[in-house]
Image: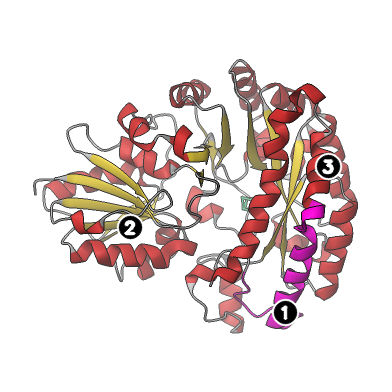
Amino acid sequence: MNIRRVVLIRPFRDGRVWGRVPGSPYTLMRLASLVPADIPVEIWDENVGKPDYSTLGPEDLVGISSMTLTIERAEEIARLARRQGATVVVGGVHATLSPEHVATFADVVVIGEGYNTWPQIIEDFANDTLKPMYVDEEWKTLDDLAPISQRVLDMVQENRRYWTPYLEITRGCPRNCTFCTAIRVSGRVMRLRPVEQVVEEIQRRRIKRFFLTDDNFGLNFRIAPEYCEELFRALAKLPLHGWTCQSELIVADYPDLLKLAREAHLDKFFIGFESVNPGNRRELGGKSRGQAEQIREVVRKIHAAGISVVGLFVLGFDHDTVETFHAMWDFIRTSELDSVSITVLTPFPSTPFRTLLEQEGRLLDVPWRYYDTAHVTFIPKQMTVEELRQAYDWLCRRVYSPSQIARRGLRSLRRHPITRAYKKAFGAFSTDYGYRRAYSWRYAY
Ligand code: SF4
């Protein structure tokens, strides 16, 4: 088969917000960089604009990367592309978690990490030897990750089209929180990219801010402190405006690393506190005891290092009742958190939580697009579906009211010297605004 081009597609989700798409198509940028230089490659991000699918043809290899939430749009795209005669490969989180579903509409399903299988798929397409499924769950070291190519950077124009460039520095999480997909998608062993590779990528992409896609970067404070120190010292030398990452509470136990992280321009931790109900601690993989006082102490210590804290909370666990929502609100309005994410527990495919719900007959028959963590997709243990829905609405209306967003944003701004406050203004309000927007998505369908 003569390959005319490779087309990599990101299904629509957020669209543009104030002229730009919230996050860059990082996975597709990496996969596009693996396409041999003599084969044309294009990235079609439906959030940037509507692609013309009628231009696809039999000599095109189409790759779609999708999470569970966008898999229905991915299926529509796959059918459009196949109608044009193109060959369609689907990978990403949902294909890894639910390959049998994806196999119903794709020519090829990719399970696990595509960094090694993708070049093989391109070669097999050229030789007419494509297989229906490719699997890579070996969790290979990240030492030899191919760099993002200049051809891809020129094509994507991420600093013009996207608000936040994404970046990956570590991958994996050994915790096994019952609701989380990280072990299936990124592996149980934490893997680290060489520091010089990370620095080189930041410089070549010319990014000044980034959001780490790592599932639990903060865990490295405990399991790889020397690596963190080396990384922070290297990042401190770069002219960055700031960066943010996801973490767990233990970072608060490492004041020296927190200080270095601040010097490395880290300005915000997204911390999975998950719950203020101690009854849920078994579901939290040992990382949190679900105690409000513990959370207040963690926030205080991280603030002392000059770093902001976004609290991530999940509601709807089997020990939660309507009263848990009231306790949550009491905690949030009296806490010093800089921003807050409130989500509904969601039974993603292949998680222990989903298996439990299947055994107990508690899964609701709803479309995958409801798996946005703002819809109720299962029957809770101690509430009705409607009670959980209403309690979540009640809490979100309070947490994301304009006055609460302004209050948290101004408090966060006051933590910075007045001379730097204008640089931090966007970040102080945008996180809460984004969550308010995500919550309001549920009314879109
Ligand atoms: S600690 Fe975070 S990333 Fe790790 S399994 Fe739990 S929720 Fe997932």
Q: Amino acid at mark 2?
A: Val
Residue at the outermost left position:
1
Magenta segment's dominant SS is: helix
SS label for mark 2: strand
Q: Position of residue 324 (x, y in %)?
A: 83, 69
* Label at residue 90: 2
What residue is at 35 percent from the left and 55 percent from the top?
Answer: 50
Whether residue 10 appears in this view of the structure is yes
Q: Position of residue 161 (x, y in %)?
A: 45, 39
- Tell whether circle 1 marks a residue whose Cβ is less than 8 angstroms from ligand 1: no
Q: Amino acid at mark 3?
A: Val
Magenta-drawn stretch contains 396: yes
Name the residue that disc number 3 marks: 298
Choose top left, top right, bottom left or bottom right for residue 213.
top right
Magenta-drawn stretch contains 383: yes
Mark nearer the N terminus (3 vs 2): 2
* Label at residue 381: 1
Choose top left, top right, bottom left or bottom right for residue 72.
bottom left
Label 3 to label 1, Cα distance in Å?
A: 30 Å
Mark 2 neighbour class, 10 Å CA radius: few under 14, some 14 to 19, many 20 or more = many
Tell me if residue 430 comes above or below residue 358 in the rendering. above
Q: Nearer the viewer, mark 2 or mark 1?
A: 2
Q: Are marks 3 and 1 in contact (CB under 8 Å)?
A: no
Q: Could you tell whether 179 is left or right of 140 in the image?
A: right
**374 or 106: which is nearer to us?**
374
Mark nearer the N terminus (2 vs 1): 2
